[in-house]
Amino acid sequence: MVGGIKYEHTHRLIAWSVGVMTIAIAIWTWLVERRAWMKRLAFAALGTVILQGILGGITVLKFLPPWFPTAHAMVGQTFFCIAVTIALFSGQRWIEEHPPVAFDTLRPSLIALTQLSVLALYVQLFLGGMFRHHGMSWWPHVVNACAVAVILTWTAVRALSQYSEIREVRRPATLMLSLMVAQLCLGFAALSRA
């Protein structure tokens, strides 16, 4: 095996094993889980891993334009988020504990800000993928990174200022800020080397 073939083959083997494990999780969830939304989440994971495999296979065989491998990457990251969510919601703490109830009276609401954050991150994934696969210049990705940083900071500050006493809100908000700073540092380091 020469060139990148060994790495691509390893990528396919890992993807195959992830697919098999996702099938097992979907079946197990369907048989054991009582929460209907968890069953839907497990089958969403199965659907995204299948879609990612199809997009990846077509990309390798057909050498399609940059938006195709970008879609492959975006679906892959969506699958990863769903898998992490399943792991979180399957944990003993999530099932047994009853977190405190809090009401959000501010506008925009924290839920609206988190939805805006997810949308901004998906746009960033698309722009980053297009840049990575030579489908567009670097500057849209960098400009949107600034917008993402503002939106995520706004969301985290709102969460920390309004719900600092609720661990289930405080910890993810703090983690989000930390990961955003780390990602910005990695992005600036990558741009400075380009």
Image (cartoon, rainbow, N blue to C red):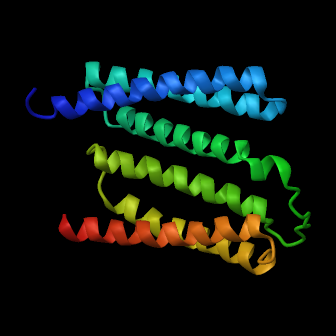
Residue at x 57% of width, y 21% of height: 23
**Is residue 92 something that shows in the picture?**
yes
Which quarter of the image is occupied by the N terminus?
top left
- Residue with the most extreme bottom position: 161
Is 31 left or right of 128, judged from the image as shown? right
Residue at x 48% of width, y 24% of height: 19
Is 6 left or right of 52, judged from the image as shown? left
Which quarter of the image is occupied by the C terminus?
bottom left
Is 144 left or right of 48, judged from the image as shown? left
Quarter occupied by residue 38: top right
- Residue with the most extreme left position: 2
Residue 144 spot, x, y in % from top left: 46, 63
Q: Is residue 45 above or below residue 98?
A: above
Quarter occupied by residue 117: bottom right
Q: Is residue 70 above or below residue 190?
A: above
Quarter occupied by residue 160: bottom right
Residue 132 spot, x, y in % from top left: 30, 48
**Is residue 51 something that shows in the picture?**
no
Is 146 left or right of 99, judged from the image as shown? left
Front in this rendered view, residue 43 or 56: 43
Q: Is residue 146 above or below residue 48?
A: below
Residue at x 18% of width, y 30% of height: 6
Q: Is residue 175 above or below residue 138?
A: below
Residue at x 59% of width, y 45% of height: 84
Front in this rendered view, residue 82 or 29: 29
Residue 140 spot, x, y in % from top left: 39, 59
